[in-house]
Image (cartoon, rainbow, N blue to C red):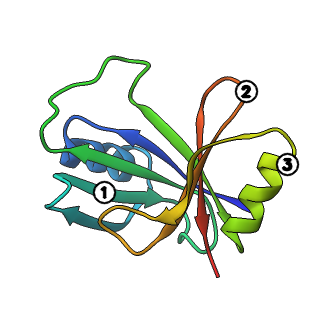
Amino acid sequence: MRLLHTMIRVNDLQESITFYTDLLGMRLLRQKEYPKGRFTLAFVGYEDEADGAVIELTHNWDCDSYELGNAFGHLAVGVEDIYSVCDGIKQRGGIISREPGPMKHSASVIAFVKDPNGYAIELIERK
């Protein structure tokens, strides 16, 4: 397993991309709009996603602002067999807050687990 990305919600996508690329020296790795879901995702990082963890910037089209504290979304971890990983987490007393299955508006297979403090950790199947 390895850490894939950290997701944060942003008010102004272009302003955020500029901050992470121009001010922090990251690269815009990819960006995609999801019109049916009314959001855009942009991934920035120092390395390609195959080589290191990156930041997912999420812009929800219908939200102008967030309160500090609720803008953090989740950490993501890549796993080979999401179903057996989730079974193992449940067997050890972990809480699966979203059972494994396809992501809405995508073919990616994901699940979510809560850490002891309630933070969400996204599991993404990577074969």
The quarter of the rendered structure image containing the N terminus is: bottom right
Q: First in sequence, mark 3 or 1: give its number.
A: 1
Please, what secondary structure does the residue beneath circle 2 have?
Answer: loop
Q: Percent position (x, y) of residue 110?
A: 53, 62
**Callout 2: 10 Å neighbours few (<14), some, many (20+)?**
few
Mark 2 lies on residue: 116
Q: Amino acid at mark 1?
A: Leu
Q: Percent position (x, y) of residue 13?
A: 22, 46
Q: Nearer the viewer, residue 91 or 40?
A: 91
Q: First in sequence, mark 3 or 2: give its number.
A: 3
Mark 2, mark 1: which one is toward the viewer? 2
The quarter of the rendered structure image containing the C terminus is: bottom right
Q: CA separation, marks 3 and 1?
A: 33 Å
Taking 68 as reference, is 52 left or right?
right
Q: Amino acid at mark 2?
A: Pro
Write down the quadrant of residue 97 in the picture: top right
Give residue 41's mark. 1
Q: CA separation, marks 3 and 2?
A: 16 Å
Mark 3 lies on residue: 91
Marks 3/2 in contact by CB < 8 Å: the verdict is no
Name the residue located 44 percent from the left edge and 19 percent from the top edge: 69
Q: First in sequence, mark 2 or 1: give its number.
A: 1
Q: Nearer the viewer, residue 108 or 98?
A: 98
Q: CA separation, marks 2 and 1?
A: 27 Å
Please, what secondary structure does the residue beneath circle 3 have?
Answer: helix
Q: Amino acid at mark 3?
A: Gln
Does residue 41 sit above or below 24 in this rendering?
Answer: below
Mark 3, mark 1: which one is toward the viewer? 3
